[in-house]
Image (spheres, grey):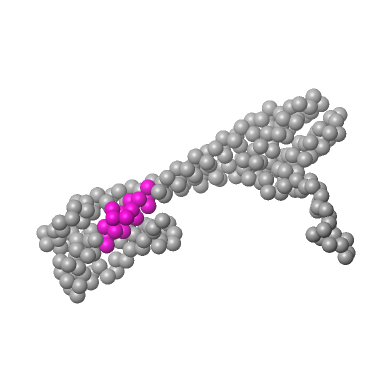
Amino acid sequence: MASNESGHAINVAKFEELIGLCTSYGPTYNPVKGSLKLTALTAQLAEANTALQALKAAKTAHDNATNAREIAFKDLKPLATRIVNALAATDAARQTLDDAKTVNNKIQGRRAVSLKKPAAGEDASAAEAPKTASVSQQGFDNTINHFAQLIQTLTAEPAYKPNEDALKVATLTAMLEDMRAKNSAVILAATALSNARIARDKVLYAQGTGLYDVAQGTKNYVKSLFGATSPQFKQFGSLRFTVKRD
């Protein structure tokens, strides 16, 4: 099995070498099976190259989308802490501030309550664990939801009217929408990348019609044409194709 993306490109390059050898035999190379004829081999090579290029383009688009999302999210944690501090400097109710702190803990990936270590001699399994905020809610979707909740808390608080543009609700809302857009772009790019891999695998490895099986069929034909010990068949000795099957 091809262990990485380069293995697929090597298969295509070997297939081009195979076509070159078959072409060099001139009219002697005359298989009955349509998929082994030179015109069919050449068409399959072109299709394989197109699939590889489409996959490269999809991979680049996915990389660009994930990079853009990373940039959009990278300043959120320190910003969320600034927001809570700004809220604490207002006349907001203690309950409102506590709500904001809880959401910020989720954004930061912190537990709302530190886990209590068992006392000496105490059975840790028997001790009642305090309720804590989950530290597993750090996915991009969850982070967006937490930030949206924080903005909602600020919007509902009349006392939150910062002078700093970066902390204003309008600025935070625009940032939230940008984060949502960047996250959606990654989701779409990931789907396109997956589809491009499926298309590549179909061209290269579909049973009976893929490049791999056609290459094996071509080898068998040349073996039957010139013989297993012939110089012509020995030319195919270096043309080793790797297979990827689901």
Q: Which residues are magenta?
A: 199-216
Going by the image, does 40 lie left or right of 91? Answer: left
Q: Is residue 229 magenta?
A: no
Location of residue 97 with respect to 213 vertically, above or below: above
Residue 192 image position (x, y, % from top left):
45, 43
Kindly indicate the quadrant of the structure image that contains residue 180: top right
Residue sticking out furthest to the left: 27
Q: Where, quadrant-wise, is the C terminus in this rendering? A: bottom left
Residue sticking out furthest to the bottom: 229
Name which residue lies at 27% across and 60% down. 215
Residue 232 image position (x, y, % from top left):
19, 69
Inspect this view and state whether residue 13 appears: no
Inspect this view and state whether residue 129 appears: yes
Going by the image, does 95 lie left or right of 3? Answer: right
Name which residue lies at 19% across and 63% down. 221
Kindly indicate the quadrant of the structure image that contains residue 238: bottom left
Location of residue 209 with respect to 151 vertically, above or below: below
Name which residue lies at 41% across and 49% down. 197
Name which residue lies at 21% across and 51% down. 40
Residue 69 image position (x, y, % from top left):
58, 42
Overall secondary structure of the magenta stretch?
Answer: helix
Residue sticking out furthest to the right: 120
Marks counted in the figure total: 0
Q: Is residue 200 magenta?
A: yes
Going by the image, does 147 lie left or right of 234? Answer: right
Residue 1 image position (x, y, % from top left):
40, 62
Residue sticking out furthest to the front: 126
Going by the image, does 65 lie left or right of 227? Answer: right
